[in-house]
Image: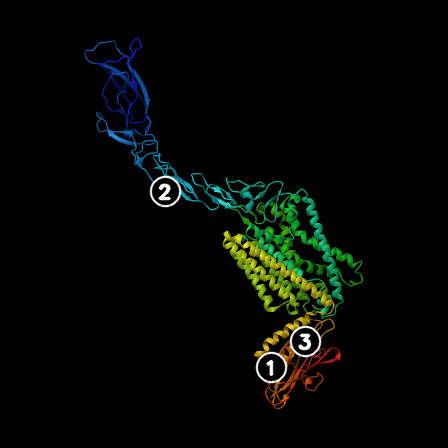
């Protein structure tokens, strides 16, 4: 019994026959045996005058100073006390023992004095009153009942004496009040965990891995962490953070552990065969391009004539960038990411063939992935070599293997540069896990800097030196070494794939474009954990590229300037949608439709450009399209926009030039090239024009078509423009053999494209509205030299 409680029990008297008896003059007395530190309360005798008699009320207490000592077992005796003068047979006494305990739950410690024990304080247990409570077993006083704290709720019923506090949803138990065990301390649920109402520990949220009850880390393979119990992984995933794919599974491009297909080895062999076939097709194109270039004329437009639509390669690169945008972590929705990643078909990825299932490890797969471009290249070189010594032997006479190899490199490398760089960089993109281990960012189940990693390190260095850095460096070196012979047939046959799409001043444009692709890949691979800087750098790259194309128009064919700009703008919009998704992941689903719309627009732009490209190729073969003519018309439109803001004399001279450019007249070569490239005019006063005349310098920049392909010469002539009072002017082009035109020295091998001389019809100054019309309704007559010595006259 607990300290302070009274002995409880009943006494029944029986006679010798076993019958119940009562005695009016007999009493019962309880005597407690002496025990160190134990005291008992005094109690009177009770009479045995009823069938059942309750024991006297005797409480056992313990000295306060000994309450921390082990409590003893106390003996007691129940004696029969006869009244004085009574007689009868003696009655045997009853004895017993009772074990003392500390205060139970709901009882609290109190101290009191016992009669006959002096000033010694004794401890006893009393039931706590309604406003207080004790939930501790021991000599602890009752305390006032407390309410549930913050972040917790009371789930007790009306019959409960004290509250039953539980942590609310979204909070976890971190402690219990030592003075009141029903009161709990709750803290916000840790990031990556799910906390339900109660006192249970938090559970990992889907996509998170529980290191402990209070630490949860985001899984690098989100599909491998279903959430729930700590350290639980989905089927096919094992290891820390569920990073390792189990036996019979492989890591695909989405970092998912997927069951190995039954014919994985056949898929890899088939993929390699497809790449070899693509390389063989590229070899045929290379041979035909080399043969065509060697037949062309030095500096002639025939070298630039297209046999294949170059827009196809530009569209392919745009698709590769879309695949990269789908792979970077921008909180895309599942549908949006899937749509973007479908464009990864343009990125040659060995994961498409489930190679880990057939190659047994990532390290073998890495060596194969770095070698994939070599398969395409070797296929191209093999076919080119075969054709050189067989069907194309006559056309490739004098062509060395070095020329064919360089032509193959510069034809294939730009197309596979993005996947080639990504595959090489994978080995060097390592990240540190929360437990301190270093793993590959692309495959967190593979460790970095261990023995296996170092075994393929030379392969990665070789890829960097050969592909990532070697291709742009060798390309730039080849261009710089041959920059003065770029339009020579021999040079064009070898290096033409690098610069044939670009205007001569921007012959390095192909290498610059490789640099742009390298910057995109580096940002996507090495800044993958910092999305805000990643978005900023990618936007800077794309916007700078679009500005350069819009400002400088580096492509020789106007179609490609427009296509490059449009494709880049669509990529910028997709990236901005990704930024919006990253800023508000909950709204990512609403961005799926805009993403799909931009992908449709991208495909439409590409399809339209490809159709236009093919159409121009067909028309060019029929001599119905010339890029020089196209550029001349664009220059004419630009001049037309400038004329209204010029002085009258200068404006009329520029107008005449614009008319001729717009009509496509001038010095044309037999291969469709036009000699006129730029026009510069300026006015001055000189005695050459005679009294009352104003001189206008008409400087026409003429392409020399020399072997260097870069130099140009300027033929300058002056035309005397007399002040005229009439509202119309008559324009005539001076003959190059005239005395006036011979007053300036010209390059002897260059024909004069056009020198304009105006002759006044009256003394009045021509008004602005009477200048030569650019629309064809009011046009001045002029005579321009034609190729072959023939002169043509264009009448209004």
Q: Which mark is residue 663?
A: 3
Q: Which quarter of the rendering shows the N terminus?
A: top left
The spot of residue 548 in percent (x, y) is: 59, 66
Check the image and report above or below for 215 versus 789.
above
Name the residue rendered at 67%, 42% in the picture. 262
The residue singled out by tag 1 in the image is 650
Check the image and report above or below for 385 versus 639.
above
Q: Is residue 517 visible?
A: no
**Magenta-colored span:** 647-652
The residue singled out by tag 2 in the image is 149
The spot of residue 524 in percent (x, y) is: 57, 55
Front position among marks 3 and 1: 3
**Which comes before the other along the chain, label 3 or label 1?**
1
Do tag 2 and tag 3 residues touch (Cβ < 8 Å)?
no
Do tag 1 and tag 2 residues touch (Cβ < 8 Å)?
no
Mark 3, secondary structure of its residue: helix
Mark 1, secondary structure of its residue: helix
Mark 2, secondary structure of its residue: loop
Give the CA separation, mark 3 to mark 1: 20 Å
**Which comes before the other along the chain, label 2 or label 3?**
2
Rendered image quadrant of residue 720? bottom right
Q: How would you classify the magenta stretch by its main secondary structure?
A: helix
Instruction: Report the side of 17 relative to 408 (left or right).
Output: left
Give the CA separation, mark 1 to mark 2: 89 Å
Check the image and report above or below for 538 versus 241.
below
**Which comes before the other along the chain, label 1 or label 2?**
2
Magenta run includes residue 648: yes
The spot of residue 213 in percent (x, y) is: 46, 41
Magenta run includes residue 262: no
The spot of residue 707 in percent (x, y) is: 71, 71
Q: Nearer the viewer, residue 345 or 154?
A: 154
């Amino acid at each position: 019994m607990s300290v302070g409680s009274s002995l409880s029990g009943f006494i029944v008297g029986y006679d010798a026959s076993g019958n119940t008896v009562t005695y009016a003059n007999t009493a019962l007395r309880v005597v407690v045996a002496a025990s160190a530190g134990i005291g008992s309360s005094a109690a009177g005798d009770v009479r045995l005058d009823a069938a059942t008699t309750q024991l006297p009320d005797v409480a056992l207490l313990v000295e306060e100073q000994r309450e921390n000592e082990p409590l003893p077992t106390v003996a007691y005796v129940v004696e029969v006390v006869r009244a004085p003068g009574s007689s009868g047979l003696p009655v045997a006494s009853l004895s017993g023992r009772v074990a003392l305990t500390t205060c139970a739950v709901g009882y609290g410690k109190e101290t009191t004095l016992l009669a006959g024990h002096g000033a010694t304080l004794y401890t006893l247990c009393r039931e706590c009153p309604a406003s207080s409570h004790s939930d501790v077993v021991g000599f602890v006083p009752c305390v006032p009942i407390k309410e549930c704290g913050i972040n917790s709720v009371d789930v007790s019923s009306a019959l409960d004496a004290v509250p039953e506090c539980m942590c609310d949803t979204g909070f976890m138990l971190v402690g219990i009040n030592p003075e009141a065990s029903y009161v709990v301390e709750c803290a916000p649920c840790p990031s990556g965990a799910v906390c339900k109402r109660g006192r249970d520990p938090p559970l990992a949220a889907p996509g998170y891995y529980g290191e402990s009850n209070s630490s949860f880390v985001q899984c690098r393979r989100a599909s491998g962490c279903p959430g729930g119990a700590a350290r639980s992984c989905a089927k096919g995933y094992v290891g820390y953070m569920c990073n390792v794919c189990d036996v019979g599974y492989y890591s695909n491009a989405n970092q998912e552990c997927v069951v190995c297909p039954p014919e994985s080895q056949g898929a890899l062999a088939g993929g390699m065969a497809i790449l070899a076939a693509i390389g063989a097709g590229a070899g045929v194109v290379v041979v035909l391009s080399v043969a065509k270039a060697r037949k062309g004329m030095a500096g002639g437009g025939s070298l630039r004539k297209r046999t294949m639509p170059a827009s196809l390669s530009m569209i392919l690169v745009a698709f590769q960038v879309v695949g990269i945008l789908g792979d970077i972590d921008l909180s895309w929705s599942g549908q949006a990411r899937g749509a973007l990643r479908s464009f990864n078909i343009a990125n040659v990825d060995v994961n498409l063939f489930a190679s880990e299932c057939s190659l047994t490890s990532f390290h073998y797969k890495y060596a194969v992935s770095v070698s994939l471009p070599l398969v395409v290249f070797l296929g191209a070189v093999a076919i080119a070599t075969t054709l050189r010594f067989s069907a194309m032997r006559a056309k490739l006479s004098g062509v060395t293997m070095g020329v064919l190899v360089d032509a193959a490199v510069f034809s294939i490398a730009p197309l596979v540069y993005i996947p080639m760089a990504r595959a090489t960089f994978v080995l060097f993109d390592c990240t540190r896990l929360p437990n301190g281990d270093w793993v590959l960012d692309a495959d967190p189940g593979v460790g970095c800097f261990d023995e296996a990693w170092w075994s393929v390190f030379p392969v990665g260095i070789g890829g960097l030196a050969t592909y990532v850095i070697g291709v742009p460096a060798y390309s730039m070196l080849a261009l710089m070494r041959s920059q003065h012979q770029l339009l020579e047939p021999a040079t064009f046959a070898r290096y033409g794939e690098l610069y044939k799409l670009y205007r001569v001043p921007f012959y390095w444009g192909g290498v610059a474009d490789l640099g742009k692709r390298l910057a995109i890949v580096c940002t996507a691979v090495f800044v993958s954990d910092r999305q805000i800087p990643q978005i900023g750098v990618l936007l800077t790259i794309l916007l700078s590229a679009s500005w350069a194309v819009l400002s400088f128009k580096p492509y020789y064919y106007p179609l490609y300037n427009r296509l490059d700009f449009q494709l880049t703008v669509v990529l910028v919009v997709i990236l901005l949608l990704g930024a919006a998704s990253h800023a508000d992941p909950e709204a990512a689903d609403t961005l799926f439709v805009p993403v799909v719309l931009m992908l449709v627009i991208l495909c439409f732009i590409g399809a339209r450009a490809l159709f236009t490209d093919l159409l121009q190729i067909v028309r060019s073969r029929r001599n119905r399209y010339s890029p020089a003519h196209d550029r001349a018309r664009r220059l004419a439109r630009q001049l037309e926009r400038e004329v209204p803001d010029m002085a009258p004399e200068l404006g009329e001279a520029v107008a005449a030039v614009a008319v001729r450019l717009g009509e496509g007249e001038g010095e044309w070569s037999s291969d469709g090239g036009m000699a006129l490239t730029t026009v510069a005019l300026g006015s001055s006063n000189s005695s050459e024009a005679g009294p009352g005349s104003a001189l206008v310098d008409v400087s026409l920049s003429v392409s020399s078509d020399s072997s260097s392909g870069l130099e140009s010469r300027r033929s300058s002539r002056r035309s005397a423009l007399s002040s005229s009072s009439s509202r119309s002017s008559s324009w005539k082009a001076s003959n190059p053999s005239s005395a006036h035109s011979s007053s300036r020295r010209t390059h002897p091998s260059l024909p004069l494209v056009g020198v304009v001389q105006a002759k006044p019809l009256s003394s009045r100054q021509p008004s602005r509205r009477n200048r030569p019309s650019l629309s064809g309704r009011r046009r001045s007559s002029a005579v321009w030299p034609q190729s072959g010595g023939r002169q043509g006259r264009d009448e209004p």
